[in-house]
Amino acid sequence: EVQLVQSGAEVKKPGESLKISCKGSGYSFTSFWIGWVRQMPGKGLEWMGIIYPGDSDTRYSPSFQGQVTISADKSISTAYLQWSSLKASDTAMYYCARRVSMVQGVYYYYYMDVWGKGTTVTVSS
Amino acid sequence: SSELTQDPAVSVALGQTVRITCQGDSLRNYYGSWYQQKPGQAPILVIYGQNNRPSGIPDRFSGSSSGNTASLTITGAQAEDEADYYCNSRDSSGNQVFGGGTKLTVL
């Protein structure tokens, strides 16, 4: 069974650092991009960025560039999302998801077929 | 533009048909995908590509695309379909982008 298992809930203070994880199993971890998605309380899904564990090629959405770091350790099939200095506004649920890419005729399409259950991050003084 | 626009809320009578739409320039180049999210749960994929359903998704869910608009149609909406629905597409930078989401109410 293809799974993404995320690390547990975190409660941190402003200014602290944090690294959350997403471990893949049941498939070739190095062959699929892994994306990170933020959902602030009561709000919609926001795409943060994506990494290809095979070579660590990473892309960030403009809103998150410089705010977080996405990395991966292919030896243990795990992707990470980290902050160097948390803010209260980082309080949110964070999901990882596997991205699949396919070609149908002349069209390319991309979709996230497997999601982690999410990691709740609470930042409060 | 890498933005996707959805109506914030849509309602449908039980058993009737509802269409949820998503507009954005990236949809001219890439098929969108659709995700259902119920309160307290992670999103799940319901439609991808031209009109493909993952295993386990009822056939009352279907997708279509024309120009810069992708649509999700639920034919014969059920109470359990009440949820938030998000479209998603790849953008020109190689990343993905979500629409703002549509809250579906089944009356």
Image (cartoon, rainbow, N blue to C red):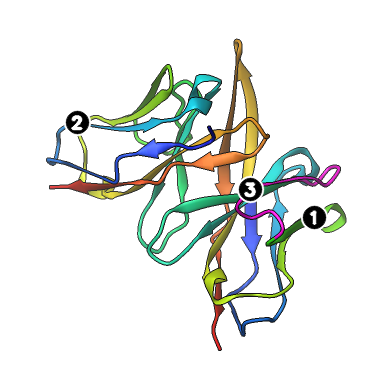
Q: Label 3 marks which chain's residue?
A: A
Residue B18 in percent (x, y) is at 22, 33
Closer to us: mark 3 or mark 2? 3
The residue labelled by disc 3 is A62
Q: Residue at image x 50%, y 20%?
A: B28
Q: What label sits on residue A72 in the rendered view?
A: 1
Contact? badges 3 and 2 (CB < 8 Å): no
Chief secondary structure of the magenta portion: loop
Subunit of label 2: B
Numbered label attached to residue B106: none
Q: Kindly identify which chain the residue marked by label 1 belongs to.
A: A
| Labels 3 and 2 share a subunit | no
Whether residue A79 is visible: no
Badge 3 element: loop
- For mark 1, does the 10 Å Cα neighbourhood hold few (<14), some (14 to 19), or many (20 or more) residues? many
Neighbor class of circle 2 (other Cα within 10 Å; few <14, some 14-19, many 20+) is some
Q: CA distance from mark 1 to mark 3?
A: 20 Å
Q: Are marks 1 and 3 in contact (CB under 8 Å)?
A: no
Q: Are marks 1 and 2 on the same chain?
A: no
B31 or B29: nearer the viewer: B29
Magenta segment, which residues? Answer: A52-66
A98 left or right of B103 in image: right
Q: Secondary structure at mark 1?
A: strand
User: Disc 3 marks which amino acid?
Assistant: Pro
Q: Quadrant of residue A71?
A: bottom right
Q: Which mark is residue B17?
A: 2
- The residue at the point 40 percent across, 64 percent down is B40
- Earlier in the chain: of badge 1 and badge 3, it is 3
